[in-house]
Image: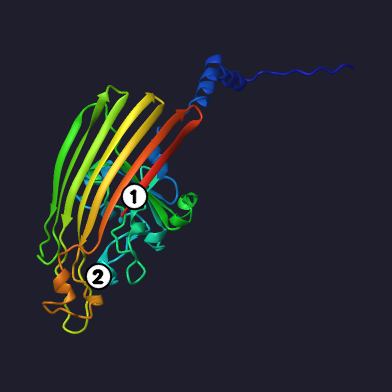
Amino acid sequence: MRSQNYYAITPLALVFAGFLTPDAFADEVERDTETMVVHSTAEEALKQQPGVSVITAEDIARDPPVNDLSEIIRKMPGVNLTGNSASGSRGNNRQIDIRGMGPENTLILIDGVPVTSRNSVRYSWRGERDTRGDSNWVPPEMVERIEVLRGPAAARYGSGAAGGVVNIITKRPTNDWHGSLSFYTNQPENNKEGATNRANFSLNGPLAGDALTMRLYGNINKTDADAWDINHAQNGSYAAGREGVRNKDINALLSWKLTPQQIVDFNYAYSRQGNIYAGDTQYSNGNLSPDGLVSELYGHETNRLYRQSWGLTYNGIWDWGQSKAGVYYEKNQ
């Protein structure tokens, strides 16, 4: 006896098969190949890295004007300024301190080049250098962005960056002529606090089309010293106010574009910085007589620094990445 198998197509199967048309398969394949493209700049990618903060030129423009970049950098996580009336540090000079490791373990870079002028300044009596650090050489208006690296992000810079790194990136020359002149003033309500005045100028543009461009900027600023008795106490010694500062800077950059991907830069900078004594009574044994140390030196420069730097840098852009090589020289006295 032969047995036969029969298969019947039910109406439900016909309905299901009706949906599986070639057009339906095409739609499904098209949906599977759809992708989402997310555009991100290098600055945005850098901000996402742990231990890294980026301050852009737009951020600086939105904030109130400042005389020293340290006043902007101090707002970043893990950043503090050493030297204040409470600590009694000599001169109350304020330097950038990252993660509590001290200014000696905080590396300052300008366009990726270490700035070491503060290392030429003598140590104070409590182990800190009697300097304002290296954050006042560039006017805020000339900053493209500031990168603040903390912890592991700064490890590749060596032992001098155990706390962190501050990289100040300046604005590049443009292909059109631009110039600016600005004036900044800060007049405290209390006349015992030192007032600040600063004038900046900048000029940049092409010298030979796109192939050779230049940038020139400079600034003159002065912050008066606080009154010697701003923290006056009835008995014993008391902390002096913050010292003032006189600062003059000029910076010139020539950029030679060999090709759109090969650029050679020559940079020269000159700076002169001097403090304005504020009456360091904690270390003068309370000698406030008219012929005493405070009265004799108050309002005068007791520390002066001259800085010169030269740099020759080659920047290359390749299919596999970027390269940078340079020779730099810095003289401080």
- Give the quarter of the figure containing the C terminus: bottom left
The image quadrant that residue 328 belongs to is top left
Q: How crowded is mark 2: few (under 14 residues within 10 Å), some or many (20 or more)?
A: some
Q: Can residue 13 be seen in this view?
A: yes
Toward the bottom, the furthest residue is 235
Residue at 56% in and 16% down = 21
Residue at 41% in and 62% down = 101
The image shows residue 60, relative to residue 255, as above or below, that is below
Determine which residue is flagged by label 2: 85
Q: Secondary structure under badge 1?
A: strand
The image quadrant that residue 215 belongs to is top left
Residue at 36% in and 56% down = 77
Give the left or right position of residue 228, taking residue 25 as reference. Answer: left
The foreground one among 138 and 288 is: 288
- Please name the amino acid that badge 1 sits on: Lys
Give the left or right position of residue 329, taking residue 241 as reference. Answer: right
Residue at 25% in and 67% down = 91
Circle nearer the viewer, 1 or 2: 1
- Please name the amino acid that badge 2 sits on: Ser
Give the left or right position of residue 4, taking residue 260 as reference. Answer: right
Q: Residues within 10 Å of mark 1 (few under 14, many from 20)?
A: few
